[in-house]
Image: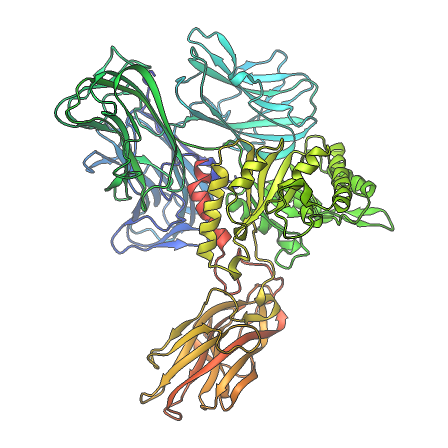
């Protein structure tokens, strides 16, 4: 655990904005809310002109925007740092018409333990600066040689006084410096190469920077990094980007780690395996990770090797090799001195240590004695593992020594012990013992608003004896190469038009997905025997260009004979060999042969023998066809609910496949027992569909988000390496009521209407089952028009319409009051119009129709031209805003009740395509899956 040599150089790098930023790249980002998905940072200049922009973003769906002619700055929350470490700062900036070449900047403020400002890093207010007009551009800076008393920093985004134009900031991240020298090959190839080397420094293809390492060979080729010092007790995350073209073996390209002792002798491959990571086929830049821990007892360093096997054809590129410690505890081994916050007689001891040169020692007294780590930034929904090495001598009680966790909010205020006051001693010990490691896992479920933690090491009051602490580790529990997926559909679904495919895939990538699930089998002309490959070819190339894997459902009817299915599967797999990672064989074929719904499907006897045998033969044909077309592709068989007896029966009958898929929805209950059964099978496991049952028709968007986040956590942290992925269902809304001319039937559980009763106090509008026109529910308006003057009530909603309406209709249960009924809507520019039907002069139910464009009256807004503007190019061009009821200057005075049901519309012409706003429901609300993936991304993916 030797000290690091720190230089005082600032390195600023500009990388062109066409590079795709995968949110997962920002592993262990120390900047809280660095992509502004949770809002703007709170520390802003007076007269702030900062805007949270949801229409322009680089990472996620939001960015921070500023337009000003006075100085404007916005600061992050404080970020704990170690003065002895080096950090990489990265930010994306977009500018438009900035009048000064350096008028937009990023600044770093150093702060001491008392929260006093120490000054700008390196004495410069502008660590990064830019101007002019440019698309999203990545800027990086290396931070080292921090002031001796610096314990925190703030990152500031800034625009100078007197500067005109607009700037956007996004994807701000801070990470400890990469431990791999020249990990992106910007300084050339690594020097340790195989004899007859065929490695090339490629300046035309790269992921990070401008160069990569390329190899084309038919003999084994390897290239090793310089020695990277490691602590054998630490945990490290290795990540690297690999691109392949026509690699003839599914595992012919690999990453290998060699352990080396202090005398530079090779000790063998890490974990006994030469291939720590392997891949093949054809794929765009893909991130692979490996967690390294439990090194050999005499390991002092490692080498990282990039390799291609002998006799493997094709080309491979390597880039962005990163190694970083997973430990979030600063100065975990006390090599840089004692922790700053302490009470009592803690001292450094260089005669007793578990590793390195020193440990922290304290002898008991009449008072409690403790030391506290620096603040540790956490993801609220993540789970962690804590470990500590402890040695004791003569401790007078069995639990007088303890390790605890303290929870802090964003303001760095202490808000309680984890998990509670009564259980705060997560680790406790006593007596006399040599160095012993204590570990506590599954640390999560923190107190609400927890943003930071501190580790407490202490000895209770009135305890005698001596204790030593060393190698304190607090690390995020994670899975390597986990598949975060989202389900889409082919162009035959109205929400997924073919000409919007790139938008669909881009949205999936932007949500943090690394794999896209789609049912897109090519059409086959049985007369000519010719496939139409055009759409699937486009899917494959679009996903390749967006750097996302493909999970393809072969969604052909299993009414075809096995030989036909075999031929079709082989044709598809052969054409896309190495390009499609996962093939699903049909969909939920368990449901086609279960005896009845009264069986839960957990036993093999729950399936009809005749039906099962036919389906088994056809799945076997599909499976063999895929394997013969692409031996390295993964084959998936999915089931719904608890139907694991179907999987058991297929295994018993010798069907071959690699992955079991689970379709699980909220109405199916707790999935734990089913997951336990799944991991007992030989196949890997992916949850390939998950959501609240009936989605937005049974719950709010927020409820869906919370369910999806909780379930995805259960899957990700499930204690089995067999569970390798999770998909949310689905990316876009399938056609909903608005696409069929529906505005509201009042059958939905959520109620998206609000009442403006300013001129009719006490009026209400509620969902009711008292009186319905067609189904079970309607909307009940109770109003009060008793005051003098014009009384009216407005029932507000906000529904996107799928084109330009011709008529709006509704069913109204009248009360013969004579009060005037009307509607309000917005055109495609946002101008508001009102249209009136006339007096309610009937009793009972009546279906009424209003001609939408027949002389509506403008109320202003938008382009304010009094003309209803249409757009044939914009989906959901118009928005339905309100239903109104008016008494018009005391013409009719009194209170009353009417019921409204089945509000619908017809179209003059639809929008160009019913292309859904991502998870935009019938009311125009942002959907749960977008919200859920934001949460999953912010809390799990960005730290994966």
Instruction: Report whether 896 appears left or right of 22.
Output: left
The N terminus appears in which quarter of the rendering? top left
- Please state the horizontal and vertical placement of residue 122, each as a whole percent of the image: 28, 31
What is the number of callouts on the image?
0
Q: Quadrant of the rendered structure where residue 848 is?
A: bottom right
- The residue at the far right in this view is 527
- The residue nearer to you, when weighing 921 against 146, is 921
- Please state the horizontal and vertical placement of residue 343, each as a whole percent of the image: 16, 28
- The residue nearer to you, when weighing 345 against 653, is 653
- Please state the horizontal and vertical placement of residue 547, each as a whole percent of the image: 58, 39
- The residue nearer to you, when weighing 759 against 910, is 759
Q: Quadrant of the rendered structure where residue 326 is?
A: top left
Q: Is residue 227 visible?
A: no
Q: Is residue 925 visible?
A: yes
Is the residue 384 above or below the residue 522 in the image?
Answer: above
- Please state the horizontal and vertical placement of residue 206, each as a whole percent of the image: 55, 32
Is the residue 943 above or below the residue 893 in the image?
Answer: above
């Amino acid at each position: 655990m030797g000290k690091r040599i720190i230089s005082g150089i600032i390195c600023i790098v500009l990388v062109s904005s066409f590079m795709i930023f995968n949110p997962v790249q920002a592993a262990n980002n120390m900047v809280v809310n660095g992509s502004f998905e949770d809002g703007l940072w709170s520390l802003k200049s007076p007269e702030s002109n900062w805007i949270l922009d949801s229409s322009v973003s680089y990472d996620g769906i939001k960015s921070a925007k500023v337009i000003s002619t006075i100085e404007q700055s916005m600061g992050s929350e404080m970020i704990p740092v170690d003065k002895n470490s080096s950090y990489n700062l990265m930010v994306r900036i977009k500018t438009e018409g900035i009048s000064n070449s350096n008028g937009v900047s990023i600044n770093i403020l150093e702060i001491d333990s008392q929260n006093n400002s120490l000054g700008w890093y390196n004495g410069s207010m502008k660590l990064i600066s830019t101007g002019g007009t440019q698309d999203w551009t990545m800027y990086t800076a290396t931070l080292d040689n921090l002031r001796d008393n610096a314990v925190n920093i703030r990152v500031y985004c800034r625009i100078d006084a007197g500067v005109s134009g607009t700037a956007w900031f996004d994807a701000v991240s801070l990470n400890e410096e990469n431990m791999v020298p020249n990990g992106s090959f910007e300084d050339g190839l690594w020097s340790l190469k195989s004899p007859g080397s065929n490695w090339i420094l490629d300046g035309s293809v790269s992921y990070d920077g401008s160069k990569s390492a390329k190899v084309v060979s038919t003999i084994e080729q390897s290239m090793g990094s310089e020695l990277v010092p490691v602590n054998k007790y630490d945990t490290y995350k290795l990540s690297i980007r690999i691109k392949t073209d026509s690699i003839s073996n599914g595992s012919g390209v690999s990453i290998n780690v060699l352990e080396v002792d202090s005398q530079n002798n090779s000790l063998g491959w890490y974990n006994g395996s030469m291939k720590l990571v392997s891949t093949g086929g054809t794929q765009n830049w893909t991130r692979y990770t490996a967690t390294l821990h439990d090194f050999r007892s005499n390991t002092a360093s490692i080498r990282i090797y990039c390799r291609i096997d002998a006799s493997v054809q094709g080309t491979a590129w390597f880039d962005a090799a990163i190694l970083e410690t997973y430990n979030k505890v600063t100065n975990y081994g006390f090599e840089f001195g004692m922790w700053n916050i302490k009470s009592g007689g803690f001292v450094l001891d260089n005669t007793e240590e578990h590793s390195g040169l020193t440990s922290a020692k304290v002898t008991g007294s009449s008072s409690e004695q403790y030391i506290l780590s620096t603040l540790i930034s956490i993801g609220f929904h993540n789970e962690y593992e804590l470990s500590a090495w402890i040695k004791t001598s003569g401790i007078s009680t069995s639990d007088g020594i303890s390790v605890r966790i303290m929870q802090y909010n964003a303001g760095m205020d202490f808000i309680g012990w984890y998990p509670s006051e009564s259980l705060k001693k997560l680790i406790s010990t006593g007596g006399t013992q040599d160095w012993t490691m204590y570990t506590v896992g599954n640390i999560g479920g923190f107190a609400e608003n927890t943003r930071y933690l501190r580790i407490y090491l202490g000895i209770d009051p009135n305890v005698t004896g001596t204790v030593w602490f060393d190698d304190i580790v607090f690390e995020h529990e994670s899975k390597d190469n986990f598949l975060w997926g989202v389900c889409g559909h082919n162009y035959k679904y109205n929400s997924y038009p073919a000409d919007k495919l790139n938008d669909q895939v881009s949205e999936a990538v932007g949500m943090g997905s690394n794999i896209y699930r789609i049912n897109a089998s090519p059409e086959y002309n049985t007369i000519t025997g010719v496939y139409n490959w055009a759409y699937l070819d486009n899917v494959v190339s679009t996903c390749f260009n967006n750097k996302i894997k493909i999970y393809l459902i072969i969604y052909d009817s299993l009414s075809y004979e096995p030989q036909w299915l075999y031929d079709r599967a082989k044709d598809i797999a052969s054409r896309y060999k190495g390009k499609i990672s996962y093939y699903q064989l049909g969909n939920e074929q368990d449901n086609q042969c279960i005896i009845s719904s009264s069986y839960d499907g957990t036993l093999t006897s729950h399936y009809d023998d005749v039906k099962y045998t036919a389906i088994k033969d056809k799945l076997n044909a599909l499976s063999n066809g895929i394997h013969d077309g692409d031996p390295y592709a993964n084959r998936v068989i999915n089931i719904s609910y608890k139907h694991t007896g179907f999987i058991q029966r297929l295994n018993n009958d010798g069907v071959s496949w690699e992955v079991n898929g689970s379709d699980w929805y909220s109405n199916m209950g707790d999935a734990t027992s089913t997951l336990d059964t799944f991991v007992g099978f030989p196949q890997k496991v992916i949850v390939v569909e998950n959501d609240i049952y009936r989605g937005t028709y049974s719950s709010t968007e927020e409820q869906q988000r919370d369910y999806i986040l909780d379930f995805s956590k259960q899957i990700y942290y499930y204690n089995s390496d067999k569970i390798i992925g999770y998909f949310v269902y689905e990316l876009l809304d399938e056609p909903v009521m608005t696409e069929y001319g529906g505005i509201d039937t009042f059958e939905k559980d959520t109620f998206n209407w609000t009442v403006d009763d300013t001129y009719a106090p006490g009026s209400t509008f509620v969902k009711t089952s008292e009186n319905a026109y067609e189904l079970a529910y309607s909307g009940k308006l109770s109003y009060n028009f008793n005051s003098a003057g014009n009384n009216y009530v407005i029932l507000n909603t906000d529904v996107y319409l799928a084109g330009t309406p011709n008529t709006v209709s509704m069913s109204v249960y009248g009360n013969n009051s004579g009060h005037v009924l009307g509607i309000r809507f917005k055109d495609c520019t946002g101008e508001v119009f009102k249209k009136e039907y006339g007096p309610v002069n009937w009793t009972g139910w009546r279906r009424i129709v209003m001609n939408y464009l027949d002389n509506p009256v403008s109320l202003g807004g938008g382009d304010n031209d009094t003309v209803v503007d249409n757009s044939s190019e914009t989906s959901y061009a118009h928005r339905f805003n309100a239903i109104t009821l008016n008494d018009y200057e005391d013409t009719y005075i009194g209170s009353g009740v009417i019921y409204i049901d089945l509000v619908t519309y017809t179209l003059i012409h639809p929008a160009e395509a019913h292309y859904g706003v991502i998870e935009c429901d019938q009311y125009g609300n942002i959907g749960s899956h977008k919200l859920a993936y934001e949460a999953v991304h912010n809390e799990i993916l960005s730290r994966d």
